[in-house]
Every structure is written in structure tokens, then in C-alpha cells.
Image (tube, helix red, strand yellow):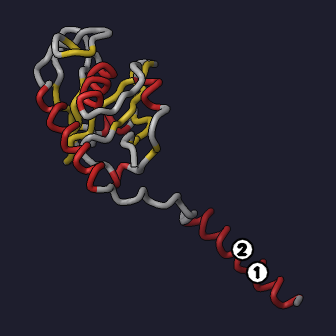
Amino acid sequence: MRHAHRHTTSLFSLLMSCTVLFGCATTSPPPPEPSARQLELHQRILQETLAQLGRPYSYGGADSQGFDCSGLVHHVYADAGILLPRTAAQQRAQGRAIPQTALLPGDLLFYRIDGGDHVVVYIGEGRGVHAPRPGKTVTIAEVDRPWWQQRLHSARRLLPP
């Protein structure tokens, strides 16, 4: 009995050493593979997102006349039949967090920029679509660049099962 306790303690010590020295702590499991329905919704969100490129930025805007970042997300998700809250902060509280390595087109990236929340629709290959600011239009951003990565708050999947 005493030998088994010593073995457990030594295994625990080994795991702790590995975690501290090499950063090999266990991580949360990857998100489940998306269902056929989710993939269909992602495709629909992607198509509608790309259809909005070039639309003007409009603070509080949520239709094809103009968008702010969360209005764009609200619009493209509603087009796919998914109702989301209106603001980026409220949208960030929806769905589940996913690692960047699991991103699919249509997932959302949330950023902290100049003290405010900003949301981008991921479209694949390190790029996302967003409504940046007044005087600009809905555009594609290279979100895998350091400027974006330094401001990333979370990546989220908001699709129903």
C-alpha cells in the first residue's frame, strides 16, 4: 500500500515538473468535428459575409446600407437563421471558445482594440472580414499578422449543434 502511494506521488511530481519546466499541461479537448448542418451554415455565413465586402461603415449599422463590426456579424448570422445579440461584447458571450487551430470559415474572432470590443468573421487562410471604422468599408484583414494577434481576445464558434 505504501509503495503504491509513493508511485502515485512520484507520478504527480513528474507531471508537475513537466508542466512547470516544459509547459506540457493538459489542455481542453479540441471542439468536436462540425456536423453537416454546421458546415452548411458556415458556408452560408461565408457567402453572405463576402457579399458585404465594400459596404460602408456605419456606426450602429446592421444592414446593407452600412455596418459596424457587430452589425455585420448580426446580419450575416441572421441570414443563416441564427439570431445573435447586437453588440460585440454580447456576441462574445455566445457559443463556445475554440482554439485558433480549429477555426472554420464563419467562426468569429473577438479583439480588444483601443479599449473597445471588435469582431471579425473568419473566412479562412488567416483572413477575416470586418467593418473597421468610419470612412472605411467592409474589408478583408490578415488576422494572422502580429498586430491582430496581439489584440486577440478569443475565437468562438456560435453555431447550434
Query: Decide: marks 1, 2 in contact (CB < 8 A)?
Result: yes
In the picture, measured across the screen, residue 65 lies left or right of residue 98, that is left
Mark 2 residue crowding within 10 angstroms, few (<14) / some (14–19) / many (20+): few
Q: Residue at x 46, y 44 (%)?
A: 96
Q: Is residue 66 above or below residue 85?
A: above
The percent position of residue 161, horizontal first and vertical second, equals 40, 49
The percent position of residue 129, horizontal first and vertical second, equals 21, 31
Mark 1 residue crowding within 10 angstroms, few (<14) / some (14–19) / many (20+): few
Tag on residue 124? none
**For this rendering, which residue is in front, 81 or 98?**
81
What residue type is disc 2 on?
Answer: Phe
What residue type is disc 1 on?
Answer: Thr
**For this rendering, which residue is in front, 121 or 143?**
121
List the single residue furthest toward the right. 2
Question: Which residue is disc 2 drawn over?
Answer: 12
Q: CA distance from mark 1 to mark 2?
A: 6 Å
Q: Report which quarter residue 43 is drawn in.
A: top left
**For this rendering, which residue is in front, 104 or 43?**
43
Q: Is residue 116 above or below residue 147?
A: above
Q: Secondary structure at mark 2?
A: helix
Q: Residue at x 88, y 90 (%)?
A: 1
In the picture, measured across the screen, residue 85 lies left or right of residue 131, that is right
The percent position of residue 26, horizontal first and vertical second, equals 56, 64
Q: Is residue 113 above or below residue 14?
A: above
Q: Residue at x 44, y 35 (%)?
A: 153
Question: Which residue is disc 1 drawn over?
Answer: 8
Q: Is residue 2 above or below residue 86?
A: below
Q: Residue at x 27, y 15 (%)?
A: 62
Q: Secondary structure at mark 1?
A: helix
